[in-house]
Every structure is written in C-alpha cells, then in structure tokens.
Image (cartoon, rainbow, N blue to C red):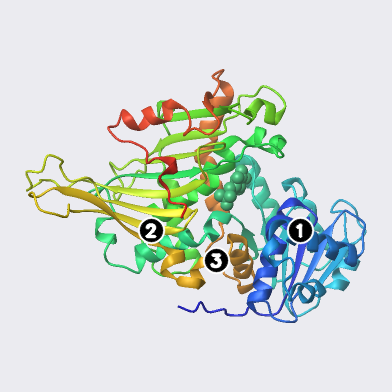
Amino acid sequence: MASRIIPVEDFDLIIFGATGDLARRKILPGLLRRFIAGQMPPGARIVGSARTDMDADTFRADIRAAVAEYDPARADHPELDRFLSVIDYVPLDANEPGGWDRLRAALRPGVIRAAYFSVAPGLFGALARGMAEHGLADGDTRIVVEKPFGHDLASARALNAMLSGHFSEGQIYRIDHYLGKETVQNLMAVRFANILFEPLWNAHSVDHVQITVAETVGVAGRGDYYDKAGAMRDMVQNHLLQLLCMIAMEPPYHFDPDAVRDEKLKVLRALTPVDPGDIVRGQYRAGGDVPGYAADVGHSSRTESFVALKVRLANWRWQGTPFYLRTGKRLRARASEIAVVFRTPPHSIFDAAEPPQANELVIRLQPDEGIDLKVMIKEPGPGGMRLVQVPLDMSFAEALGEDGAELPDAYERLIMDVIRGNQTLFMRGDEVETAWAWTDPIVAAWEAGAERPQPYDAGSAGPEAAAELMRRDGRRWRGIAEVRTG
Ligand code: BG6
C-alpha cells in the first residue's frame, strides 16, 4: 500500500528558539524527513532564530550534529546537504529591538509564512508583538505555539487575549503533539468511517474506558519546569484530556477544524468536578540505580510524577460510564493506550465454567501503534464448549507493510498541517481554557492541603492506591507491560 505524499505549498518557516532542545530533537529532524519524502517544495525556506549570535553556517553545522544525535539513520543521507542549504539563521532577542529587520529581509513576501514559537511561554508576548510591529503578522502568517499554554485558567486566558491582540484565532496553532500521533487520528477513522463501533459507543455497551500514558523517563534535565507543573498540568490537562475528547465526542458533521473542535469542546464542558477520593497522586522513589524524584529535582517536593483519576462526563451518551486516566514517569514500560472495555453479554447461554469476558477495543498509541479487539471464541479442540478470549490484533506497521514501518512523527505531520492551513489537530483557545477550568480546582486543592503524593518504586506500575481505585469498582487496570513491543 503506497502512502501518498502530497507536497505542500511554498512557505517560509521561522523557528524561534531554533537552538533549543525541541527544535534540535524534533522540529528540525522532522523537517528533514519531510524534505527527504518530497513533501517540502524545493523553494521552501527555514529561518532559525535564537539569541545566540552566530552565522548561518554555524547553525547548519549544529543541525547536522542534531541530526546525528536524534536521527542517526539520516546523518549521512544524500539529501541532508540540500536540506541544509534551504536553512538560514537570524540572531534575535525577543526582548530587544534589534534583529527584526534582518529577519524580515530573510523572508519572502507572498508566500505562506509560519512562525514556530519553540521558546519559553514568557517570550510568547514579546515575539507576537515583535512580529506585529515589524509587519510579519499579516493574514497569511500562522504562529505555532508550544505547550505549556498557561499554567492555569487565568494565565491561559491572558495568553489567549495577548495573542488575539496580534493574530486572529485562524492564525494561531496551539500544538498538542498527541493529536499528531498516527493512532489518535486513526481513532477518528475507526469511530467514524466504520459502522461497527458507533452503535455500541455509549454507556449501554461500554463498561468503562481506560487511558494510560506510561513513561519510563524521569524528570531529570527539566526538573525546574516539571516541579512547578506536575503530571496533572504537564500531561492530564492537555494530552490525556485530548485523548478523552477523541474517544468521547459526538460525530462531528464534517471532518472540518471547527466541527471537530466544537465536539471536543462539548466533551470538556461535560466533565464533572472530580471527587478527591477518585484521585491518586504518586511520586517515584529511588529504585536500583535510578534516582528518586527528589534527587532528580534537587530538593524534597510535593509535586506528583504520577496521577490516576476517575472521570465522569455529564451527558446522555456517557452517563454511567467512568473514564479512568493514569499517567506517570519512571513506570515499568513506555506504553500509551486507550482501552474501551465493553460490558459482558447480559446472559450467557454456555455452561462453561468461565463466563464470557468483556470485549475490549485497545488503541495502542505507542510503541507498536495499532488496534486490538479482544473477542470470545470457542477454545479449539474436542471436549465440549470452552470459551477463550483472543485478540484480533492489527499492528499498523504490519498491516501497512513497508509504508507503515515508519510512520511520520507527530511534529512532522503537524508542521505540514500548519502550512496547509488545517487546524483540525490543533487546540482552539476555548478548548484550552475549558480544560484548565476543570483542572484548576483539583490542583488548587492539592496546593492548599498538606498531603504528599504516595511514593512508588521506579520501574513499577505506580502506587498501590491506583490499583485500588479500580479494584473498589470491581475493575482492574490493564497491565502496563501488556502492550506489545514486537
Ligand atoms: C510532553 C511532556 O508534552 O510529552 C513530557 O511535557 C512528556 O513530560 C512528553 O514526557 C511525552 O510525549 P511522548 O510523545 O514521548 O509520549
């Protein structure tokens, strides 16, 4: 099955913060892959910008080093030199007046212009203002804004108000890179391009939904940011809630940016306040050679590196179906998935010792993206009717052959969507604010209280209380290591 590469229109892309970690790790290597794939038109230009005073050749050498570090398979690619030749560099300090004229001179009039704000949120305002004051904010300009988008409702509102003073909502692309993951979009295809699931996609047939984003990494290296955020602000407010929206939303009338985002917003608005007894916070402690959270951030802290919670949606479709979310650092495996666990049949006609188990639809985000449907069948062989649950497992890499073996990274896809002017996979300002409005009271209660997160061993599945959160409802989490890695 050949995947089709549809080149985008000619563009100039400015990357502010071009020497930073995200640019070196994700954005520039991702652009190289799109260049190699033939998706970037030959004339397209990339202008890196950062405070460091250096010339374009030094910047290109740094990109070469970044590619060697983060995408070594392409370090010697024959197209790398051609890619580097479309890259320019302009030093600019967002808080200083110099540099803007040079930046403007490096850009072409009449082509799509995109500016990626890959900088600390404290600089968003200065960059937006600088662009507007220097004639770089006209209608064909798009800005891409990285998370964190505020740290609570008030700061997100202020950020939205500030950006909308210079750019229209149609020009603002708020990135949640989880929306760029292949399987997340596939979730919409599975739900809305098949008749199979939609009739069952409600509280009558779905017992509960589990969303897990488990990471093995700790917070070392970005402890300053993380310790002020915690898992709730860093992961739940954005990535996990966006996944929840994709699972729970009504069918949009069309696959169109605002139609999709209107439906997601309705889900966020339907979130009910969470009972404090339905939340478990955890913090990893040292295990083996792995340091604990306090050592990683350099001091004792009450910030959570793990959170599990039971969430409800007050609407007709989901009345009575809880959504269990969990995410954490330093867990047993890197495994992200959504499991839709259906109800068991109302009556079993079989005398089997084991009654039928619930069907499960598991959407694996990473690793090994794919979809797995667990169904009951007769256990093969003679000896009467015994039931067994088997997976109907579709790994995208296998199903799509060579083309599926290397799916584009979320950032690659999202940057191309920015150039195409397609905001479907980007968060609208009202979505972000509504997500904060729900998150704020949870975090405020923690900050006002004196309780510490529950310790869990690095390399485990999180605190025991998270398992209890499910157990007391007669349910259980899927094992974190159950996700295939093959
Ligand atoms: C980021 C968070 O948004 O997502 C990180 O700030 C987290 O803390 C990362 O590690 C996870 O992304 P991925 O794509 O590796 O699952």
Residue shown at 58%/27% (left/top)? Answer: 287
* View extreme (top): residue: 450
On the image, which quarter does residue 324 sit in? top left
Q: Are marks 3 and 2 in contact (CB under 8 Å)?
A: no
On the image, which quarter does residue 92 sit in? bottom right
- Between residue 227 and residue 330, name the one nearer to us: 330
Reply above or below: 295 against 377. Answer: above
Relative side of 287 to 399, left or right: right
Query: Which class describes the residues within 10 Å of circle 2: few (<14), some (14-19), or many (20+)?
Result: many
Instruction: Please name the residue that numbered disc 1 is placed on.
Output: 66
Specify the amino acid type for callout 3: Glu
- Between residue 309 and residue 62, name the one nearer to us: 62
Relative side of 171 to 423, left or right: right
Specify the amino acid type for callout 2: Ile
Query: Which class describes the residues within 10 Å of circle 1: few (<14), some (14-19), or many (20+)?
Result: many
Mark nearer the N terminus (3 vs 1): 1
Instruction: Please name the residue that numbered disc 2 is placed on.
Output: 371
Relative side of 406 to 473, left or right: right
Residue shown at 51%/66% (left/top)? Answer: 405
Reply above or below: 236 against 398. Answer: above
Residue 60 appears in the picture as rendered? yes
Label 3 or label 2, whichever lies nearer to me, is: 3
Specify the amino acid type for callout 1: Ala
Q: The N terminus lies in which quarter of the figure?
A: bottom left
